Image (cartoon, grey):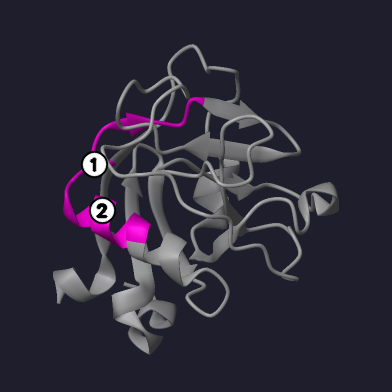
Amino acid sequence: MSAATADDPENTLVLETTPGTIVIKLRTDVAPKHAERLKMLAREGFYDDVPFHRVIDGFMAQTGDGQHGDGTGGSKHPDLKAEFSTVPFDRGIVGMARKGHSNDSANSQFFIMFDEGHFLNRQYTVIGEVVDGMDVVDRLKRGEPPTEPDRIVSMTVAADAE
């Protein structure tokens, strides 16, 4: 476990993926409801064996469809109201995906930025940032969807592993 997880293990997600480990610090200061949702779903095992179904070079890697695995699904929980902030979409930022142009439709899917995407600022909810494992994110297989997508093997809240 990285030193970053020791700061706030209750708000740190550890993603064991097919190419390696990714550690995400949740931004409860800007998106508390979205942070709670990701932790709840992680604790339910919702993200286990879920593919990175949309991975666009120079943009982002999207995952979190534990219902269908293809980007069309969500969870059994209701959609969330947007929690937009001034945090910019830079490399390593984690944002919540949503349905089309409906601001209040984020549910379970999220994406990790490969590069800056400031056109997303204040239009998508920033949920966290990668604090360890961006080299793993960079190795994710590209495609919409990738032919043989990388997967989240398991996603846990760091506090639960201690």
Tag on residue 42? Answer: 2
Q: Which residue is mark 1?
A: 46
* Side of 100 relative to 150 (left or right): right
Q: Residue at x 19, y 56 (%)?
A: 43
Task: Look at the image and say whether residue 42 sits in the magenta stretch.
Answer: yes
* Side of 21 relative to 118 (left or right): left
Quadrant holding the N terminus: bottom left
Magenta-colored span = 37-53
CA distance for labels 2 and 1: 6 Å
- The three-letter code of the residue at mark 1 reads Phe
The image shows residue 15, relative to residue 48, as above or below, that is: below
Q: Residue at x 46, y 51 (%)?
A: 80
Q: Nearer the viewer, residue 54 or 38?
A: 38
Q: Nearer the viewer, residue 161 or 105?
A: 105
Task: Look at the image and say whether residue 102 sits in the magenta stretch.
Answer: no
Q: Secondary structure at mark 2?
A: helix
Q: Percent position (x, y) of residue 132?
A: 49, 65
* Side of 23 relative to 60 (left or right): left
The image shows residue 121, relative to residue 87, as above or below, that is: above
Residue 34, picture quadrant: bottom left
Q: Secondary structure at mark 1?
A: loop
- The three-letter code of the residue at mark 2 reads Ala
Q: Percent position (x, y) of residue 31?
A: 52, 68
Q: Residue at x 41, y 29 (%)?
A: 150
Q: Residue furthest right?
A: 119
Q: Percent position (x, y) of residue 135?
A: 56, 52
Q: Nearer the viewer, residue 42 or 85?
A: 85
The image shows residue 79, relative to residue 42, as above or below, that is: above
Residue 84, picture quadrant: bottom right
